[in-house]
Image (cartoon, rainbow, N blue to C red):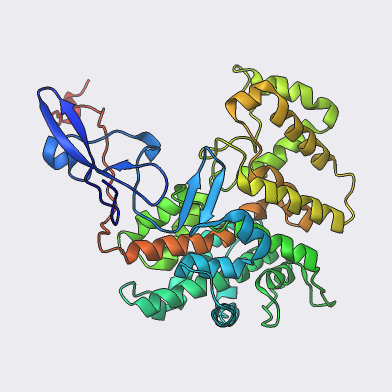
Amino acid sequence: MDAINGTSAKTATLNIGDKSWELPILDGTIGPQVVDIGKLYGQTGMFTYDPGFTSTASCESQITYIDGDEGVLLYRGYPIEQLAEDGDFLETCYLLLYGELPTAAQKADFDYRVTRHTMVHEQMSRFFHGFRRDAHPMAVMVASVGALSAFYHDSTDISDPQQRMIASVRMIAKMPTLAAMAYKYTIGQPFVYPQNELDYASNFLRMCFSVPCEEYKVNPVLSRAIDRIFTLHADHEQNASTSTVRLAGSSGANPFACIAAGIACLWGPAHGGANEAALKMLGEIGSVERIPEFIKRAKDKNDPFRLMGFGHRVYKNYDPRAKIMQKTCHEVLGELGIKDDPLLDIAVELERIALQDEYFVERKLYPNIDFYSGITLRALGFPTSMFTVLFALARTVGWIGQWKEMIEDPGQRIGRPRQLYTGAPARDYVPIARRK
Protein backbone atom coordinates (compact mmCIF):
# COMPACT_ATOMS: atom_id res chain seq x y z
CA MET A 1 0.00 0.00 0.00
CA ASP A 2 1.26 3.50 -0.81
CA ALA A 3 2.40 5.75 2.00
CA ILE A 4 0.21 8.68 3.06
CA ASN A 5 1.77 11.49 5.13
CA GLY A 6 4.75 9.35 6.06
CA THR A 7 2.73 6.31 7.16
CA SER A 8 2.39 2.93 5.50
CA ALA A 9 0.49 -0.32 5.92
CA LYS A 10 3.75 -2.18 5.25
CA THR A 11 5.59 -3.69 8.22
CA ALA A 12 8.87 -5.42 8.98
CA THR A 13 8.98 -8.46 11.24
CA LEU A 14 11.59 -8.66 13.98
CA ASN A 15 12.25 -12.15 15.32
CA ILE A 16 14.11 -12.63 18.60
CA GLY A 17 14.07 -16.15 19.92
CA ASP A 18 10.53 -17.45 19.81
CA LYS A 19 8.99 -13.98 19.84
CA SER A 20 8.26 -11.64 16.93
CA TRP A 21 7.17 -8.04 16.56
CA GLU A 22 5.72 -6.07 13.66
CA LEU A 23 7.48 -2.73 13.05
CA PRO A 24 5.91 -0.11 10.74
CA ILE A 25 7.72 0.78 7.53
CA LEU A 26 7.49 4.48 6.60
CA ASP A 27 7.88 5.96 3.11
CA GLY A 28 9.31 9.38 2.36
CA THR A 29 8.64 11.38 -0.80
CA ILE A 30 11.86 10.00 -2.29
CA GLY A 31 14.72 8.05 -0.81
CA PRO A 32 15.01 4.89 1.31
CA GLN A 33 12.16 3.58 3.40
CA VAL A 34 12.63 3.58 7.17
CA VAL A 35 11.68 1.05 9.83
CA ASP A 36 9.94 2.83 12.71
CA ILE A 37 11.58 1.60 15.92
CA GLY A 38 10.11 4.30 18.17
CA LYS A 39 8.34 1.68 20.32
CA LEU A 40 11.04 -0.98 20.09
CA TYR A 41 12.35 -0.57 23.63
CA GLY A 42 8.90 -0.55 25.15
CA GLN A 43 7.94 -3.71 23.26
CA THR A 44 11.17 -5.70 23.45
CA GLY A 45 13.30 -4.12 26.17
CA MET A 46 16.09 -3.71 23.59
CA PHE A 47 17.83 -0.77 21.90
CA THR A 48 19.32 -0.67 18.43
CA TYR A 49 23.07 -0.14 18.02
CA ASP A 50 24.18 2.26 15.28
CA PRO A 51 27.49 4.09 15.94
CA GLY A 52 27.49 7.40 14.07
CA PHE A 53 23.76 6.98 13.32
CA THR A 54 24.65 6.10 9.72
CA SER A 55 21.59 3.84 9.36
CA THR A 56 19.24 5.85 11.55
CA ALA A 57 16.77 8.56 10.51
CA SER A 58 16.85 10.94 13.47
CA CYS A 59 13.94 13.08 12.29
CA GLU A 60 11.42 13.77 9.56
CA SER A 61 12.37 16.72 7.36
CA GLN A 62 11.16 18.48 4.21
CA ILE A 63 14.23 20.66 3.65
CA THR A 64 17.12 18.84 1.98
CA TYR A 65 17.45 15.55 0.13
CA ILE A 66 20.69 13.79 -0.77
CA ASP A 67 21.14 10.72 -2.95
CA GLY A 68 24.79 9.91 -2.42
CA ASP A 69 24.83 7.04 -4.92
CA GLU A 70 23.53 9.21 -7.76
CA GLY A 71 25.27 12.44 -6.70
CA VAL A 72 22.05 14.39 -6.12
CA LEU A 73 21.50 17.32 -3.73
CA LEU A 74 18.08 19.01 -3.58
CA TYR A 75 17.01 22.03 -1.53
CA ARG A 76 13.21 21.77 -1.13
CA GLY A 77 13.21 19.67 -4.30
CA TYR A 78 15.34 22.04 -6.40
CA PRO A 79 18.72 20.74 -7.71
CA ILE A 80 21.68 22.54 -6.17
CA GLU A 81 23.14 23.11 -9.64
CA GLN A 82 20.14 25.22 -10.71
CA LEU A 83 20.02 27.25 -7.51
CA ALA A 84 23.75 28.00 -7.56
CA GLU A 85 23.87 28.87 -11.26
CA ASP A 86 20.59 30.75 -11.70
CA GLY A 87 19.66 32.13 -8.27
CA ASP A 88 21.42 33.92 -5.45
CA PHE A 89 22.11 33.10 -1.82
CA LEU A 90 19.29 35.13 -0.25
CA GLU A 91 16.81 33.51 -2.62
CA THR A 92 18.10 30.15 -1.37
CA CYS A 93 17.74 31.38 2.21
CA TYR A 94 14.11 32.26 1.57
CA LEU A 95 13.53 28.84 -0.02
CA LEU A 96 15.06 26.97 2.93
CA LEU A 97 13.14 29.00 5.50
CA TYR A 98 9.71 29.21 3.84
CA GLY A 99 9.64 26.15 1.60
CA GLU A 100 9.05 27.88 -1.75
CA LEU A 101 10.98 30.18 -4.06
CA PRO A 102 9.94 33.81 -3.51
CA THR A 103 8.00 36.00 -5.89
CA ALA A 104 9.72 39.21 -6.95
CA ALA A 105 7.86 41.12 -4.22
CA GLN A 106 8.68 38.52 -1.56
CA LYS A 107 12.33 38.51 -2.60
CA ALA A 108 12.56 42.30 -2.40
CA ASP A 109 10.94 42.28 1.05
CA PHE A 110 13.20 39.50 2.35
CA ASP A 111 16.35 41.16 0.98
CA TYR A 112 15.27 44.42 2.64
CA ARG A 113 14.70 42.75 6.02
CA VAL A 114 18.05 40.96 5.94
CA THR A 115 19.92 44.07 4.83
CA ARG A 116 18.37 46.17 7.63
CA HIS A 117 19.52 43.68 10.27
CA THR A 118 23.21 43.44 9.29
CA MET A 119 24.51 45.79 12.01
CA VAL A 120 25.32 44.33 15.43
CA HIS A 121 24.95 46.02 18.80
CA GLU A 122 27.80 48.51 19.25
CA GLN A 123 28.81 46.92 22.55
CA MET A 124 29.67 43.76 20.61
CA SER A 125 32.85 45.49 19.43
CA ARG A 126 34.01 45.68 23.07
CA PHE A 127 33.27 41.99 23.41
CA PHE A 128 35.73 41.26 20.59
CA HIS A 129 38.49 43.18 22.31
CA GLY A 130 38.46 40.65 25.13
CA PHE A 131 40.12 38.07 22.86
CA ARG A 132 43.81 37.70 22.19
CA ARG A 133 44.83 39.00 18.79
CA ASP A 134 45.96 35.54 17.74
CA ALA A 135 42.68 33.87 18.73
CA HIS A 136 41.35 31.50 16.07
CA PRO A 137 38.42 33.14 14.23
CA MET A 138 36.25 30.10 14.91
CA ALA A 139 36.78 30.50 18.64
CA VAL A 140 35.66 34.10 18.28
CA MET A 141 32.60 33.03 16.25
CA VAL A 142 31.47 30.41 18.78
CA ALA A 143 31.61 33.01 21.55
CA SER A 144 30.19 35.99 19.66
CA VAL A 145 27.21 34.11 18.17
CA GLY A 146 26.36 32.66 21.57
CA ALA A 147 26.64 36.18 23.02
CA LEU A 148 23.94 37.48 20.64
CA SER A 149 21.37 36.03 23.03
CA ALA A 150 22.61 38.54 25.63
CA PHE A 151 21.91 41.45 23.27
CA TYR A 152 18.67 40.43 21.56
CA HIS A 153 16.28 39.29 24.29
CA ASP A 154 13.26 40.13 22.15
CA SER A 155 13.83 37.14 19.85
CA THR A 156 14.67 34.28 22.22
CA ASP A 157 11.14 33.07 23.02
CA ILE A 158 11.01 29.93 20.89
CA SER A 159 7.27 29.49 21.48
CA ASP A 160 6.51 32.71 19.58
CA PRO A 161 6.51 32.24 15.76
CA GLN A 162 7.21 35.92 15.20
CA GLN A 163 10.25 35.85 17.48
CA ARG A 164 11.51 32.70 15.79
CA MET A 165 11.39 34.43 12.41
CA ILE A 166 13.03 37.60 13.74
CA ALA A 167 15.84 35.50 15.22
CA SER A 168 16.21 33.66 11.91
CA VAL A 169 16.54 36.85 9.87
CA ARG A 170 18.85 38.40 12.45
CA MET A 171 21.26 35.49 12.36
CA ILE A 172 21.39 35.30 8.56
CA ALA A 173 21.98 39.06 8.47
CA LYS A 174 24.50 39.41 11.29
CA MET A 175 26.66 36.38 10.60
CA PRO A 176 28.64 38.11 7.78
CA THR A 177 29.20 41.12 10.04
CA LEU A 178 30.49 38.95 12.89
CA ALA A 179 32.64 36.89 10.52
CA ALA A 180 34.19 40.04 9.04
CA MET A 181 34.77 41.43 12.53
CA ALA A 182 36.52 38.21 13.57
CA TYR A 183 38.77 38.49 10.51
CA LYS A 184 39.54 42.18 10.97
CA TYR A 185 40.32 41.67 14.64
CA THR A 186 42.90 38.95 13.97
CA ILE A 187 44.77 41.13 11.43
CA GLY A 188 44.62 44.29 13.54
CA GLN A 189 42.44 46.36 11.22
CA PRO A 190 39.39 48.43 12.23
CA PHE A 191 35.92 46.96 11.95
CA VAL A 192 33.98 48.00 8.84
CA TYR A 193 30.27 48.75 9.09
CA PRO A 194 27.89 47.17 6.53
CA GLN A 195 26.41 49.27 3.73
CA ASN A 196 22.74 48.85 2.87
CA GLU A 197 23.10 49.55 -0.85
CA LEU A 198 25.29 46.47 -1.37
CA ASP A 199 24.06 42.93 -1.89
CA TYR A 200 24.77 40.22 0.68
CA ALA A 201 28.01 38.84 -0.79
CA SER A 202 29.40 42.23 -1.86
CA ASN A 203 28.72 43.63 1.58
CA PHE A 204 30.65 40.78 3.17
CA LEU A 205 33.67 41.20 0.87
CA ARG A 206 33.74 44.93 1.58
CA MET A 207 33.57 44.39 5.36
CA CYS A 208 36.49 41.95 5.08
CA PHE A 209 38.81 43.72 2.67
CA SER A 210 38.13 47.47 2.69
CA VAL A 211 40.15 49.92 4.79
CA PRO A 212 39.15 53.47 5.82
CA CYS A 213 42.00 55.12 3.92
CA GLU A 214 40.76 54.24 0.43
CA GLU A 215 37.61 53.48 -1.51
CA TYR A 216 36.78 49.81 -2.02
CA LYS A 217 35.18 48.69 -5.26
CA VAL A 218 33.49 45.30 -5.26
CA ASN A 219 34.49 43.03 -8.13
CA PRO A 220 31.23 41.49 -9.43
CA VAL A 221 32.96 38.26 -10.50
CA LEU A 222 34.38 37.74 -7.01
CA SER A 223 31.10 38.73 -5.41
CA ARG A 224 29.22 36.23 -7.55
CA ALA A 225 31.77 33.55 -6.66
CA ILE A 226 31.37 34.04 -2.91
CA ASP A 227 27.57 34.13 -3.28
CA ARG A 228 27.72 30.81 -5.13
CA ILE A 229 29.97 29.33 -2.44
CA PHE A 230 27.41 30.36 0.19
CA THR A 231 24.60 28.69 -1.78
CA LEU A 232 26.55 25.45 -2.19
CA HIS A 233 27.14 25.26 1.57
CA ALA A 234 23.71 26.45 2.74
CA ASP A 235 22.46 23.05 3.93
CA HIS A 236 23.43 19.42 3.73
CA GLU A 237 20.75 17.38 5.46
CA GLN A 238 21.41 15.78 8.89
CA ASN A 239 25.18 16.17 9.08
CA ALA A 240 27.09 16.42 12.38
CA SER A 241 26.66 20.17 12.94
CA THR A 242 23.00 20.20 11.87
CA SER A 243 22.28 17.28 14.18
CA THR A 244 24.05 19.22 16.94
CA VAL A 245 21.81 22.24 16.34
CA ARG A 246 18.71 20.05 16.42
CA LEU A 247 19.84 18.25 19.56
CA ALA A 248 20.61 21.51 21.36
CA GLY A 249 17.31 22.97 20.19
CA SER A 250 15.36 19.94 21.40
CA SER A 251 16.10 21.04 24.97
CA GLY A 252 14.44 24.40 24.37
CA ALA A 253 17.70 26.35 24.16
CA ASN A 254 17.49 29.76 22.47
CA PRO A 255 18.35 29.86 18.74
CA PHE A 256 21.58 31.84 19.19
CA ALA A 257 22.93 29.18 21.59
CA CYS A 258 21.89 26.42 19.18
CA ILE A 259 23.75 28.00 16.26
CA ALA A 260 26.82 28.54 18.45
CA ALA A 261 26.73 24.80 19.20
CA GLY A 262 26.57 24.08 15.47
CA ILE A 263 29.59 26.32 14.84
CA ALA A 264 31.55 24.48 17.54
CA CYS A 265 30.78 21.14 15.88
CA LEU A 266 31.62 22.48 12.43
CA TRP A 267 35.05 23.51 13.71
CA GLY A 268 36.16 19.86 13.71
CA PRO A 269 38.65 19.02 10.93
CA ALA A 270 36.56 16.03 9.84
CA HIS A 271 33.61 18.34 9.15
CA GLY A 272 34.07 22.03 8.37
CA GLY A 273 37.86 21.96 8.28
CA ALA A 274 38.08 19.61 5.31
CA ASN A 275 38.76 22.35 2.72
CA GLU A 276 41.63 23.70 4.82
CA ALA A 277 43.02 20.17 5.09
CA ALA A 278 42.76 19.72 1.31
CA LEU A 279 44.71 22.94 0.70
CA LYS A 280 47.42 21.89 3.15
CA MET A 281 47.69 18.54 1.36
CA LEU A 282 48.21 20.23 -2.01
CA GLY A 283 50.93 22.34 -0.40
CA GLU A 284 52.55 19.22 1.01
CA ILE A 285 52.62 17.59 -2.44
CA GLY A 286 54.30 20.75 -3.72
CA SER A 287 54.49 20.04 -7.46
CA VAL A 288 52.87 18.02 -10.21
CA GLU A 289 56.03 15.91 -10.51
CA ARG A 290 55.59 14.60 -6.96
CA ILE A 291 51.98 13.46 -7.47
CA PRO A 292 52.85 9.82 -8.34
CA GLU A 293 54.77 9.56 -5.06
CA PHE A 294 51.75 10.68 -3.04
CA ILE A 295 49.31 8.57 -5.07
CA LYS A 296 51.44 5.54 -4.21
CA ARG A 297 51.36 6.52 -0.55
CA ALA A 298 47.58 6.98 -0.63
CA LYS A 299 47.19 3.41 -1.91
CA ASP A 300 49.46 2.02 0.81
CA LYS A 301 47.33 0.84 3.72
CA ASN A 302 50.35 1.05 6.03
CA ASP A 303 51.04 4.70 5.17
CA PRO A 304 49.09 7.24 7.30
CA PHE A 305 48.90 9.70 4.37
CA ARG A 306 45.40 10.25 2.98
CA LEU A 307 44.30 12.29 -0.01
CA MET A 308 42.09 15.04 1.39
CA GLY A 309 39.21 16.36 -0.71
CA PHE A 310 38.45 12.98 -2.30
CA GLY A 311 35.44 10.87 -1.51
CA HIS A 312 32.61 11.76 0.82
CA ARG A 313 30.81 10.00 3.63
CA VAL A 314 27.49 10.52 1.86
CA TYR A 315 28.34 10.88 -1.84
CA LYS A 316 29.38 7.64 -3.52
CA ASN A 317 29.36 9.42 -6.86
CA TYR A 318 30.71 12.78 -8.03
CA ASP A 319 29.76 15.48 -5.49
CA PRO A 320 27.31 17.70 -7.47
CA ARG A 321 28.67 20.77 -5.69
CA ALA A 322 32.22 19.99 -6.80
CA LYS A 323 31.40 20.58 -10.48
CA ILE A 324 30.10 24.08 -9.75
CA MET A 325 32.98 24.77 -7.39
CA GLN A 326 35.50 23.75 -10.04
CA LYS A 327 33.97 26.21 -12.52
CA THR A 328 33.86 28.95 -9.88
CA CYS A 329 37.50 28.33 -9.01
CA HIS A 330 38.61 28.84 -12.62
CA GLU A 331 36.48 32.00 -12.92
CA VAL A 332 38.10 33.53 -9.85
CA LEU A 333 41.64 32.61 -10.86
CA GLY A 334 41.00 33.94 -14.36
CA GLU A 335 39.56 37.23 -13.09
CA LEU A 336 42.50 37.74 -10.77
CA GLY A 337 45.01 36.84 -13.45
CA ILE A 338 46.24 33.76 -11.64
CA LYS A 339 47.16 31.56 -14.57
CA ASP A 340 49.98 29.54 -13.11
CA ASP A 341 48.87 28.59 -9.63
CA PRO A 342 50.94 25.53 -8.61
CA LEU A 343 48.20 24.30 -6.29
CA LEU A 344 45.61 24.47 -9.07
CA ASP A 345 47.94 22.56 -11.39
CA ILE A 346 48.30 19.87 -8.74
CA ALA A 347 44.54 19.85 -8.15
CA VAL A 348 43.72 19.44 -11.86
CA GLU A 349 46.20 16.58 -12.26
CA LEU A 350 44.95 14.87 -9.11
CA GLU A 351 41.39 15.15 -10.39
CA ARG A 352 42.40 13.63 -13.74
CA ILE A 353 44.06 10.72 -12.01
CA ALA A 354 41.17 10.18 -9.60
CA LEU A 355 38.66 9.98 -12.45
CA GLN A 356 40.77 7.48 -14.42
CA ASP A 357 42.81 5.46 -11.93
CA GLU A 358 41.22 2.06 -11.27
CA TYR A 359 42.00 2.32 -7.55
CA PHE A 360 39.99 5.54 -7.16
CA VAL A 361 37.22 4.60 -9.59
CA GLU A 362 36.53 1.26 -7.87
CA ARG A 363 36.31 2.98 -4.49
CA LYS A 364 34.41 5.95 -5.94
CA LEU A 365 36.89 8.40 -4.47
CA TYR A 366 35.75 11.36 -6.55
CA PRO A 367 36.80 14.97 -5.83
CA ASN A 368 34.38 16.69 -3.43
CA ILE A 369 33.54 20.36 -2.87
CA ASP A 370 36.40 20.86 -0.41
CA PHE A 371 38.89 19.96 -3.11
CA TYR A 372 38.32 23.23 -4.98
CA SER A 373 36.82 25.55 -2.38
CA GLY A 374 40.09 25.90 -0.47
CA ILE A 375 41.94 27.13 -3.58
CA THR A 376 39.11 29.53 -4.42
CA LEU A 377 38.95 31.05 -0.94
CA ARG A 378 42.70 31.48 -0.86
CA ALA A 379 42.59 33.28 -4.22
CA LEU A 380 39.86 35.57 -2.86
CA GLY A 381 42.28 36.62 -0.12
CA PHE A 382 41.09 34.63 2.88
CA PRO A 383 43.62 32.92 5.16
CA THR A 384 43.04 29.25 5.91
CA SER A 385 41.88 30.10 9.44
CA MET A 386 38.83 31.80 7.89
CA PHE A 387 37.74 28.91 5.66
CA THR A 388 35.54 27.26 8.29
CA VAL A 389 34.16 30.64 9.33
CA LEU A 390 32.82 31.15 5.80
CA PHE A 391 31.39 27.64 5.92
CA ALA A 392 29.58 28.54 9.17
CA LEU A 393 28.31 31.80 7.66
CA ALA A 394 26.75 29.92 4.74
CA ARG A 395 25.43 27.01 6.80
CA THR A 396 23.65 29.31 9.27
CA VAL A 397 20.51 29.41 7.14
CA GLY A 398 20.44 25.61 6.94
CA TRP A 399 20.86 25.32 10.69
CA ILE A 400 18.13 27.89 11.30
CA GLY A 401 15.77 26.21 8.83
CA GLN A 402 16.34 22.81 10.43
CA TRP A 403 15.97 24.26 13.95
CA LYS A 404 12.76 26.05 12.99
CA GLU A 405 11.33 22.89 11.40
CA MET A 406 12.13 20.90 14.54
CA ILE A 407 10.55 23.48 16.89
CA GLU A 408 7.37 23.52 14.80
CA ASP A 409 7.14 19.71 14.66
CA PRO A 410 4.32 18.60 17.03
CA GLY A 411 6.09 15.26 17.51
CA GLN A 412 9.35 16.89 18.61
CA ARG A 413 10.90 15.51 21.80
CA ILE A 414 14.16 16.20 23.60
CA GLY A 415 16.95 14.18 22.03
CA ARG A 416 18.11 11.25 24.13
CA PRO A 417 20.29 8.66 22.33
CA ARG A 418 20.79 5.34 24.06
CA GLN A 419 23.98 3.33 24.51
CA LEU A 420 25.46 -0.13 24.65
CA TYR A 421 27.04 -0.15 28.09
CA THR A 422 30.30 -2.15 28.31
CA GLY A 423 31.66 -0.80 31.60
CA ALA A 424 31.96 -2.48 35.00
CA PRO A 425 28.84 -4.16 36.40
CA ALA A 426 27.37 -3.01 39.72
CA ARG A 427 29.92 -3.19 42.57
CA ASP A 428 30.25 -1.94 46.15
CA TYR A 429 32.32 1.02 47.28
CA VAL A 430 35.53 0.09 49.13
CA PRO A 431 36.97 2.61 51.67
CA ILE A 432 40.39 3.90 50.61
CA ALA A 433 42.17 2.31 53.58
CA ARG A 434 41.07 -1.15 52.40
CA ARG A 435 41.94 -0.76 48.74
CA LYS A 436 44.92 -2.64 47.35
Q: Is residue 216 visible?
A: yes
Residue at 55 percent across and 74 percent down: it is: 124
Count of numbered tags: 0
In the rendered image, residue 26, in percent from the top left (x then y), is placed at 29, 46
Residue at 27 percent across and 48 percent down: it is: 416
* Frontmost residue, 53 versus 137: 53
Residue at 49 percent across and 57 percent down: it is: 77
Which of the 4 quarters of the picture holds residue 139? bottom right
Figure check: 137 above or below 21: below
Which of the 4 quarters of the picture holds residue 198? bottom right
Which image quarter holds the N terminus? top left
Q: Is residue 140 visible?
A: no
Q: Residue pushed farthest left? A: 18
Residue at 43 percent across and 72 percent down: it is: 149
Figure check: 327 above or below 89: above
* Residue 207 relative to residue 31: left or right: right
Figure check: 276 above or below 104: above
* Residue 137 relative to residue 188: left or right: left
* Frontmost residue, 210 versus 135: 210
* Frontmost residue, 251 versus 408: 408
* Residue 241 relative to residue 248: left or right: right
